[in-house]
Image (cartoon, grey):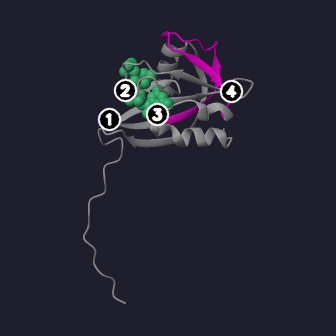
Amino acid sequence: MAEQSKPTTPAPPSAEESSAVHVAVAVIRNARGEVLLTQRHPDSHQGGLWEFPGGKIEADEDLAGGLARELQEELGIKVLHHESMLRIEHDYGDKQVLLDVHSVTAFAGQPSPCEGQPMRWVDPSDLGNYALPEANGPIVRAIVEGQP
Ligand SMILES: Nc1nc2c([nH]c(=O)n2[C@@H]2O[C@H](COP(=O)(O)OP(=O)(O)OP(=O)(O)O)[C@@H](O)[C@H]2O)c(=O)[nH]1
Ligand SMILES: [Mg+2]
């Protein structure tokens, strides 16, 4: 059977090419296997929700640089080793984000809430009791399924 010719549509721009905000997101675990959550400031985007620490990667930074700076600023720790877990593109309507999620497998210092943000170590089985941004579903699933 002859193949029907299909109209060609240009590929959508990748998140890097689009206006998505590139965000470094950290999954940090302690020796008990709990993960670190902080609460977003009420006045911020997705305010009041619990999140994984991190933030926007600046124009002059790469992922590793942005991740290290954000975790130093927010938690006072020095990242020693990190591994990519997953990337999530999400459109909130008012804002498009590309979450570059990394597992921080080694760090120096004790995480503390340097910006006065509420902070909790949470057992993976309790993550469902915290209100997280909509984009975070796949991160929670990866943690609960035990992805490193
Ligand atoms: N850090 C973090 N951001 C997240 C998560 N999930 C999620 O949708 N985001 C979104 O990603 C963006 C991160 O920006 P941010 O406000 O944390 O950036 P930042 O730390 O550089 O803040 P600042 O610009 O106020 O200094 C926000 O739009 C936020 O809603 C998450 O788990 N952690
Ligand atoms: Mg932040």
Q: Which residue is mark 2?
A: 45
Q: Which residue is mark 3?
A: 133
Where residue 116 appears, as percent x and y from the top left, is 50, 9
Q: How far is disc 4 from disc 1 in space, using C-alphas?
A: 30 Å
Q: What kind of element bears circle 4? A: loop
Q: Which residues are magenta?
A: 100-124
Q: Is mark 2 within 8 Å of ligand 1?
A: yes
In the image: residue 74, left or right of residue 79: left
Is residue 24 placed above or below 108 in the rendered structure?
Answer: below
Whichever of labels 1 and 3 marks the residue nearer the N terminus, that label is 1
Whichever of labels 3 and 4 marks the residue nearer the N terminus, that label is 4
**Residue visible at 60% across and 31% down?**
129
Where residue 9 appears, as percent x and y from the top left, is 26, 63
How would you rate the neighbour count of disc 1 (Cα within 10 Å): few for under 14, some for 14-19, many for 20 or more?
A: few
Tag 1 near tag 2, CB within 8 Å: yes
Q: How far is disc 1 from disc 2 in space, using C-alphas?
A: 9 Å
Whichever of labels 4 and 1 marks the residue nearer the N terminus, that label is 4
Whichever of labels 1 and 2 marks the residue nearer the N terminus, that label is 2
How would you rate the neighbour count of disc 3 (Cα within 10 Å): few for under 14, some for 14-19, many for 20 or more?
A: some
